Amino acid sequence: MSSARSTDRQVTAPHVADSHDLIRVHGARENNLKDVSIEIPKRRLTVFTGVSGSGKSSLVFNTIAAESQRLINETYSAFVQGFMPTLARPEVDVLDGLTTAIIVDQQRMGADPRSTVGTATDVNAMLRILFSRLGDPHIGPPSAYSFNTASVRASGAITVERGNKKAVKATYERTGGMCTHCEGRGKVSDIDLSQLYDDSKSLAEGAFTIPGWKSDSQWTVQVYAQSGFVDPDKPIREYTEKELRDFLYGEPVKVKVSGVNLTYEGLIPKIQKSFLSKDKEAMQPHIRAFVERAVTFTTCPECDGTRLSEGARSSRIGKISIADACAMEIRDLAEWVRGLDDPSVAPLLTALRDTLDSFVEIGLGYLSLDRPAGTLSGGEAQRLKMIRHLGSSLTDTTYVFDEPTIGLHPHDIQRMNDLLLRLRDKGNTVLVVEHKPETIAIADHVVDLGPGAGTAGGTVCFEGTVEGLRAGDTVTGRHLDDRSSLKETVREPTGTLEIRGATTHNLQDVDVDVPLGVLCVVTGVAGSGKSSLIHGSVPAGADVVSVDQSPIKGSRRSNPATYTGLLDPIRKAFAKANGVKPALFSANSEGACPTCNGAGVIYTDLAMMAGVATPCEDCEGKRFQPSVLEYRLGGRDISEVLAMSVAQAEEFFATGEARTPAAHKILDRLADVGLGYLTLGQPLTTLSGGERQRLKLATHMGDKGGVYVLDEPTTGLHLADVEQLLGLLDRLVDAGKSVIVIEHHQAVMAHADWIIDLGPGAGHDGGRIVFEGTPADLVADRSTLTGEHLAAYVGA
């Protein structure tokens, strides 16, 4: 009997391998995390919530996902690791139960002109093989249909080193699909000569209109005037053909000007070298404005923007060339591929159909394969990265998502939720950083971080079910069921911005009057044409301030003080109070600690092992020379000021000896956008996505402009912070500004004075105005998808 009982016990006892059902994190201290210890269930959907800057990304991306990637990299040989990015071990005591992490983040895709939706997802590679097998006429292998591959021909003698060496005549030929005129870019740059000089004047009369080119003293100008190639007293429009050719395209040649040997070069190559070869973002504003005026990008006349050679465009399957296929909306392309049936390429057609169907399923069917990857929004880029994982056979992996609902209309969020649940149901662990209540609601497990942001965050406030969060007394729990109500009264417009015949991208000859002097929200499903209407049609003049979603450029030396221009008045205030030069108070200039060059840490590169950053022993991480720290303002040295939070600095620079109105004004703006907790010297590389966009908004609030265009300002904002953003938008409008917001968040729609709704669908199903009016009229009407979702949101 006893032996039978023991046998039964052995059968029912779980296998030891099945006991690893948790990811255990103990003592996490990355960035602002304060010894965080949690247990995350595997094969479940866990959502991480909390105000922006509370430590969600530090825990999920910088701790769990980073350690998983580091451990995988260590399984490769030292040789292979030498070619891989080196990852430091996160600041954490114990990380147990990790599985392979696949990170699907919001990093915008590279803006390389040759990178398209098709090349980024491997669909172009499959299409090239398809056309090389079925295309008529047959023009060559798959490379013959690639706009990134140039045709190459070579012939000559090669020596074969085998036995008796002998030279063998050989020819080599590779057929590529690149358009030779635009080199596969689809666009050609053209310099507008009227922006370089006034052809009614002579060089002696100051014909050049290029910034910094003065006729009387500038050496560059004197080279042209005294070169002997042109007559300096003759108006440029009267130059002979030879003079004009020498003036514009002359080869570099030595000339003597006022007894000095200098190099003469044609104006066009000179401009290309001195202006166009430099990074536009790094230029001074007036130089950048000149370059934007002088250089025009036009569609390549030879390939008509398809990027492909004539041969590649001539080869067709039925009546469709590869250029036609790439220009179709993906949902139409999927239908065309479904109609192909050839046993010789059956496996390829199956894979191509599945991939294209994934595009449609994930809500990107309105894109085309030739769309440049750099023009995709953060949300579109993230969903594009999801495509390769949807049909994956992998299970027991950890998928990490960073706000997958960004850029999605409420109508599309349900579809995204279904995808997340599908990944979980295949046996994967899904970790999602998210603010939207619709996605929080589907979680199996919720981790709420906070209670505040920055130094006030970094602790776990709640861990459990969604019902538990709702009942709990945390910031997220209290705001989870918040719903904005419709305004009782709306502002009256002070004027209108007329848009007539807008046809950018998918817009279908749109006429609309955008009201000024009010809060106007432009909405519609993803891909309906909102950004095309506003960014493509609103004239970008001196009176329009545009805050888009492009990422902030900045190294680990950049911080909120340098980015916003706050450091300039602070340096001047220190210099004035101590009677020394302002440059002493810059960690990137004279005042920098010589040991660490003002970085505060010493970086040691350990080749294929993770690099190590150690605090500088000489300056103890303060970044300045000891002599600089002896100078004080209001009893504080420069390193102590940079260690202050925005809120503390706002108080410090308001009164007393340290009173600096210029600095206080910038700090006010930072506090207005909810960044009071940021420290002035915190590296930009450590800021979250939401923090970066609000930093950009605070910087632009100082610009002189009557019209503010904001592109989804609620990105990365917690439910509790949206209220503060609405207050900020109200203050801008009350100060006499016109605010146009491209937005999907229902709270912002409900708060608007006027709504312009585009649709009814995405791509060629969109591009029309389906509603114009007040939010109350939209809810009462319920004729559009937006109207239905807004009515449900406000409980109407």
Image: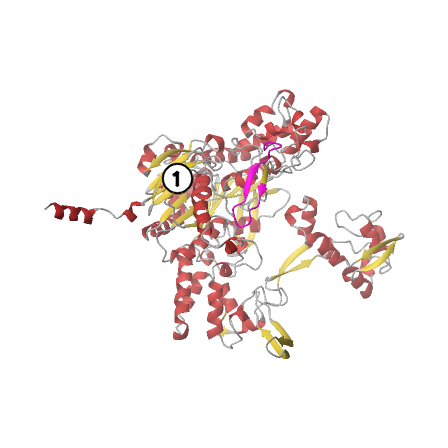
Three-letter residue code for mark 1: Val
Q: Which residue is mark 1?
A: 25
Magenta span covers which residues?
A: 603-621
**Left or right side of 359 for 466:** left
Q: Residue 790: percent from the left, percent from the top?
A: 39, 42
Which one is in front, 735 or 236? 236
Q: Residue 245: percent from the left, percent from the top?
A: 78, 63
Q: Residue at x 47, y 59 (%)?
A: 121
Q: Main secondary structure of the magenta part?
A: loop
Look at the image and say whether residue 483 sits in the magenta stretch: no
Q: Across the whole image, how many numbered discs are drawn on residues?
A: 1
Depicted 241 relative to depicted 770: above or below: below
Helix or strand or loop: what does disc 1 sit on?
A: strand
Residue 777 image-quadrant placement: top left
Q: Residues within 10 Å of mark 1 (few under 14, many from 20)?
A: many
Residue 161 image-quadrant placement: bottom right
Q: Residue 782: percent from the left, percent from the top?
A: 38, 46
Which one is in front, 497 or 322? 322
Look at the image and say whether residue 616 sits in the magenta stretch: yes
Which one is in front, 227 or 294? 227
Residue 507 in sight: no
